[in-house]
């Protein structure tokens, strides 16, 4: 089922989301939510979607692990092979000192793009979609997606991370 996206102004996007229990990830309610989030992600051709964006204040997100050349609103480039990752209770480790600015969009901030500085590499630990411990090393675009989605769990959107709002632009103008 395709879920309605919360857009900027809805308080759920500014709340700190609640941790998820491993056992709950094995129950039908969260299985259903994850399935619906995946439907929603693909419907909007996205590369990531956090639970608060569909009005569920939980520390849970989906992210496509794949090639460069996509963003949350634009989706994977044609032919890109992507693996859908379900990550709950994410924590970052070994964040690179190096930061890189890159364009980001967000389903909750429709039609806009802006340049956002992000760590270029990191390790993420949390739980997978079945409640098992998960650890991934990420760099480049995937690392960017993970940081963008994890921010949603702390009530942040990419606009909060921008150093210069002058790079903000409507996609129709890009
Ligand atoms: Ni977003």
Image: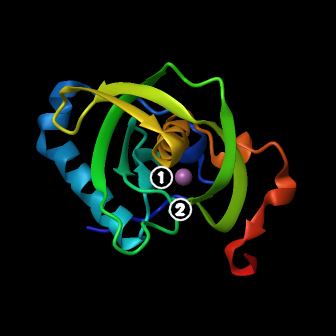
Q: Which residue is mark 1?
A: 53
26 and 96: which is toward the camera: 96
Task: Indicate yes or no: mark 2 CB to ligand 1 under 8 Å.
Answer: yes
**Residue plotted at (65% across, 47% down):** 158
Q: Does mark 1's beta carbon lie closer than 8 Å to ligand 1?
A: yes
Q: Dots 2 and 1: beta carbons under 8 Å?
A: yes
Mark 2 or 1: the one toward you? 2
Q: How is this picture coloured?
A: rainbow
Q: CA distance from mark 2 to mark 1?
A: 8 Å
Q: Quick one: quadrant of the C terminus?
A: bottom right
The residue beneath circle 2 is 107
Provide residue 22's location: percent of width, then percent of height.
21, 26
Report the residue that reaches farthest toward the top: 94
19 relative position to 53: left or right: left
Q: Looking at the picture, tell me which residue is in the foreground, 170 or 25.
A: 170
Tell me, for residue 132, which label it has, or none.
none
């Amino acid at each position: 089922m395709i879920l309605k996206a919360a857009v900027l102004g809805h308080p759920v996007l500014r709340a700190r989301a609640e941790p998820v229990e491993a056992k709950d990830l094995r129950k039908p309610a969260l299985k259903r939510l994850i399935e619906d989030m995946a439907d929603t992600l693909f419907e909007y051709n996205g590369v990531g979607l956090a639970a608060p964006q569909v009005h569920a204040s939980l520390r849970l997100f989906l992210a496509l692990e794949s090639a460069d050349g996509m963003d949350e609103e634009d989706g994977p480039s044609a032919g890109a092979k992507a693996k859908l990752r379900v990550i709950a209770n994410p924590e970052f480790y070994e964040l690179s000192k190096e930061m890189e600015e890159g364009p980001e969009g967000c389903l909750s901030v429709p039609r806009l793009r802006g340049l956002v500085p992000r760590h270029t590499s990191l390790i993420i630990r949390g739980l997978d979609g079945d409640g098992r411990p998960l650890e991934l090393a990420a760099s480049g675009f995937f690392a960017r997606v993970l940081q963008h989605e994890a921010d949603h769990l702390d009530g942040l959107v990419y606009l909060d991370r921008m150093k210069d709002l002058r790079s903000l632009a409507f996609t129709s103008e890009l």
